Amino acid sequence: MKVVIIKYNAGNIRSVLFALDRIGVQAVVTDNADEIRSADRVIFPGVGEASSAMSYLREKGLDTLIPSLKQPVLGICLGMQLMCSTSEENGTDCLGIFPMTVQKFPEDKGLKVPQIGWNTISDLQSGLFSRVEESTYVYFVHGYFVPQSEFTIATATYTHPYSAAICKDNFMAVQFHPEKSGDAGEQILRNFLI
């Protein structure tokens, strides 16, 4: 199986490579359209800022390629947010796969923004979460969130409930970092790669 990690102007790719290696999967990191298109599975991870990441995707033509992919695609953290229509982070137009606006956490709820650390996920509604228990702890680092919608397949709460994971057709995405979420995160990656 050919697994590709999309290379773009965002961090955290090395952590994803290490996590895949731990479960015995080799991946190619690339921004080459032909390599991405020919993959069996595509992972779209990221830590960073939305507008500079989208600038890189546009420069490489990946802003039109990614929404056209037919194989399973997994977005992680910033990758999930960039799959939405727009982000409040610097008023960024994103990929438009999910018709959602990424919103900034309110800073007036007595909780630190960004959310950094372990939090539980619940209402797990997809094979992506096979063998993952309700209220499992996973690792988050984010100041922006995707609201709940018909595409929500897992929920987390920080200041209020939001989408911890979303799914539409062949596109799945998680706000948390499975590559940093221990056994549960490894199981989620395995489920995606089956």
Image (spheres, helix red, strand yellow):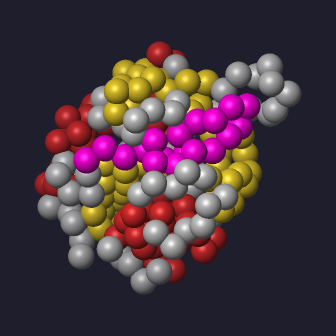
Q: Is residue 9 above or below residue 84?
A: below
Q: Residue 60, image x and y in percent? A: 25, 38
- Taking depth in this image into account, of 59 and 80 the one nearest to the observer is 80
Residue depicted at x 72% and y 45%: 116
Quarter occupied by the N terminus: bottom left
Q: Is residue 155 above or below residue 181?
A: above
Q: Nearer the viewer, residue 176 or 19?
A: 176
70 or 62: which is nearer to us? 70
Asked whether 106 falls inside the magenta stretch, the response is no
**Residue 2 lies in quadrant:** bottom left
Please indicate, yes or no, whether residue 109 appears anywhere in the rendered image.
yes
**Vertical arrangement, residue 22 with respect to residue 158, above or below:** below
Q: Which residues are magenta?
A: 152-169
Q: Is residue 168 above or below residue 112?
A: below
> Residue at the spot x=63%, y=70% of the render?
182
Instruction: Left or right? Give the position of 47 relative to 84.
Output: right
x, y percentage for residue 104?
61, 24
